[in-house]
Amino acid sequence: MAIFKKTKRVFGLLLAASLSVNVLAASAQTTSPVGDLGGGAALLPTGQIITPTAPPGSIFAPLSTGLRTDGNADANGAVSTALSPDGKTLLILTSGYNRSFSDETTG
């Protein structure tokens, strides 16, 4: 009976130690601070970093869709880009938000 009590006590101590190590490990997980990284860059909650600067030689240019003759359906608010594996096609995802709306016939 004494061996059973000793085994039970050792098992209980091992279980308690294991639980405390798991709790400590879970509370010690490091997270990146979201926000200002200096130099104008910012870390987003998604893990992506955005900066206010553009690569050398890049320009903003209107992207005409050709959907309306008055130009009111031009793509605006580029959100993301994706380049095809062969490097010949560029997809530009826009927010679909235009600054103004007018009827093509009335102006």
Image: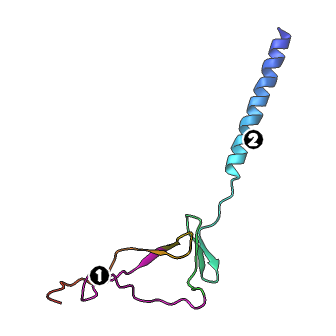
Which label's residue is closer to the chain start, 1 or 2? Answer: 2
Residue drawn where x is 57% and y is 91% of the image: 57
Relative to 101, 49 lies left or right: right
Q: Which quarter of the rendered picture does the N terminus lie within?
A: top right
- Give the answer, above or below, for where 27 lies relative to 106: above
Is 98 positioned to the left or the right of 15 in the image? Answer: left
Disc 1 residue crowd, few under 14, some 14–19, many 20+, Cα 10 Å: many
Choose between 64 and 17: the one closer to the eye: 64
Q: What residue does disc 1 label? A: 73
Magenta part mainly helix, strand or loop?
A: loop
Q: Amino acid at mark 2?
A: Val
The range drawn in magenta is 56-80
Q: Position of residue 71 (x, y in %)?
A: 28, 87
Q: Which corner quadrant of the image does residue 54 belong to?
A: bottom right
User: Which residue is situated farthest in the top direction here?
Assistant: 1
Label 2 packing within 10 angstroms: few (<14), some (14-19), many (20+): few
Type of the residue with mark 1: Ala
Instruction: Work out how far the residue at label 1 is from the one at label 2, CA to CA, in angstroms.
Output: 59 Å
Q: Position of residue 50 (x, y in %)?
A: 57, 76
Position above or below: 12 against 95: above
Q: Nearer the viewer, residue 58 or 102?
A: 58
Q: Which residue sits at x=71%, y=41%? A: 22
Find out whether residue 78 is within the magenta segment: yes
Question: What colour scheme has been applied to the protein in the rendered image?
Answer: rainbow
Q: Which residue is mark 2?
A: 21
- Label 1 secondary element: loop
Residue 23's quadrant in the figure? top right
